[in-house]
Image (spheres, helix red, strand yellow):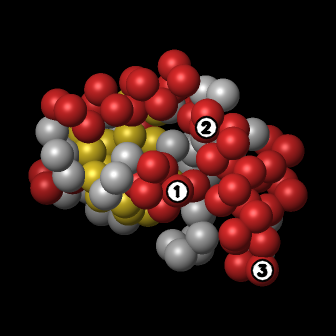
Amino acid sequence: MEVKIKRVYDKPDKEDGRRVLVDRLWPRGLTKEKANVDLWLKEIAPSTELRKWFGHDPAKWKEFQKRYKQELKRNHEQVLILKEQVKKGTVTLVFGAKDEQHNEALVLKEMLGN
């Protein structure tokens, strides 16, 4: 199965498959209709403490990945839910961050083996 990543603010596409929001906070200024999210896994997102520490600072990216992976190891239930979605077909992990090179969706996609 295929796992894609996309900003939640980008236009939804039928090629997205199931759209899973992986942010802890709902994207600012976006209605549920425009977001077109099938599932919101806010508990799979980095903890508030980790998110605030990281602040999308590229210099902290490697350490963020390490800490986030440690959090994911303790979050079996949410990871299992995500893996079940992937078994059903194409999944697009959607996120709100402007930085497309340093965000939790990339870590999740790597964890899923895509």
Q: Quadrant of the C terminus?
A: bottom left
- The residue beneath circle 3 is 59
- Which of disc 1 and disc 3 is earlier in sequence? 3
Q: Amino acid at mark 2?
A: Leu
Tell me the kind of residue under disc 3. Ala
Per the image, the residue denoted by label 2 is 72
* Marks 2,1: beta carbons within 8 A: yes
User: How crowded is the residue under tag 2: few (<14 C-alpha within 10 Å), some, or many (20+)?
Assistant: some
Instruction: Name the residue carrying label 1.
Output: 107
Is any part of residue 72 visible from this angle? yes
Towards the viewer: 83 or 96: 83
Q: Mark 3 to mark 2: distance in Å?
A: 21 Å
The residue lying furthest to the top in this view is 77
- At x 57% / y 55%, what residue is drawn? 104
> Foreground residue, 33 or 114?
114
Q: CA distance from mark 2 to mark 1?
A: 10 Å
Identify the residue at horizontal 34%, vertical 53% (top origin): 113
Q: Nearer the viewer, residue 75 or 29?
A: 75
Of the numbered discs 3 and 2, the one sitting upstream in the chain is 3
Disc 3 vs disc 1: Cβ atoms closer than 8 Å? Answer: no
Q: How far across and how far down the image is residue 66, in percent?
A: 69, 56
- Image x and y of residue 19, in percent: 31, 43
Q: From the viewer's perspective, tell me whether residue 88 is left or right of residue 41.
A: left
Above or below, 45 relative to 113: above
- Dot 1 crowding, Cα within 10 Å, few <14, some 14–19, many 20+: some
